[in-house]
């Protein structure tokens, strides 16, 4: 009788990308904060105010997740902080592979902090 390994993690690909993300951030010694909450809870407002308050001393970059628009990313960019937009097309959160592609576009090496608005 053949055996089927049912112990393999369903999300193993996501974990692989999450490890890549951690290694990239570790390579540059950059902290990364993932802000996750429901739409309309104030994540973008918090980020805009944080960037504005710290822009004289810290270089902050943002990965902006949104269901369909780039309105929040434009609000972030208005602060002169780099922002990479990810549209989830209805998904409720960003996957590690989406974050990985965005990190490759963000100038991580020249930033002090990375925020993910999820």
Image (tube, rainbow, N blue to C red):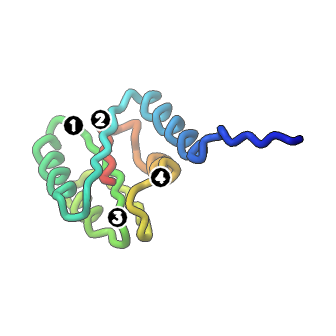
**Which percent across, then down, holds residue 67?**
36, 68
Could you say whether the residue bearing mark 1 is in a helix, strand or loop?
loop
- Up-down relation of residue 35 to residue 21 (above or below): below
Residue name at image x 37 percent, y 72 percent: 68
Q: Nearer the viewer, mark 1 or mark 3?
A: 3
Give how far apart the Cα atoms at labels 4 and 3 are.
12 Å
Could you say whether the residue bearing mark 2 is in a helix, strand or loop?
loop
As drawn, the label of residue 112 is 2
The answer to whether mark 1 and mark 4 are in CB contact below 8 A is: no
Q: Which residue is tagged 1?
A: 58
**Which percent across, then down, holds residue 43?**
21, 54
Q: Within 10 Å of the Cα at label 3, are there few (<14), some (14-19), or many (20+) other Cα atoms?
A: many
Residue name at image x 18 percent, y 47 percent: 51
Q: Nearer the viewer, mark 2 or mark 4?
A: 4
Q: Within 10 Å of the Cα at label 1, are there few (<14), some (14-19), or many (20+) other Cα atoms?
A: few
Q: Nearer the viewer, mark 3 or mark 2?
A: 3
The answer to whether mark 1 and mark 2 are in CB contact below 8 A is: yes
Q: Earlier in the sequence, mark 3 or mark 2?
A: 3
As drawn, the label of residue 66 is 3
Q: Which residue is tagged 4?
A: 95
Q: Earlier in the sequence, mark 2 or mark 4?
A: 4
Q: Residue furthest front?
A: 1
């Amino acid at each position: 009788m053949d055996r089927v390994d049912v112990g393999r993690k369903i999300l193993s690909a996501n974990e692989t990308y999450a490890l890549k993300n951690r290694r990239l951030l570790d390579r540059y010694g950059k902290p990364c904060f993932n802000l996750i909450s429901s739409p309309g809870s104030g994540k973008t407002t918090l980020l805009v105010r944080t960037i504005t308050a710290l822009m004289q001393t810290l270089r902050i970059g943002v990965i902006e997740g949104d269901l369909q628009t780039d309105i929040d990313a434009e609000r972030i960019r208005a602060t002169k902080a780099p922002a990479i937009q990810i549209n989830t097309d209805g998904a409720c959160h960003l996957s590690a592979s989406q974050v990985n592609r965005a990190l490759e576009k963000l100038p991580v090496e020249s930033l002090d902090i990375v925020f993910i608005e999820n």
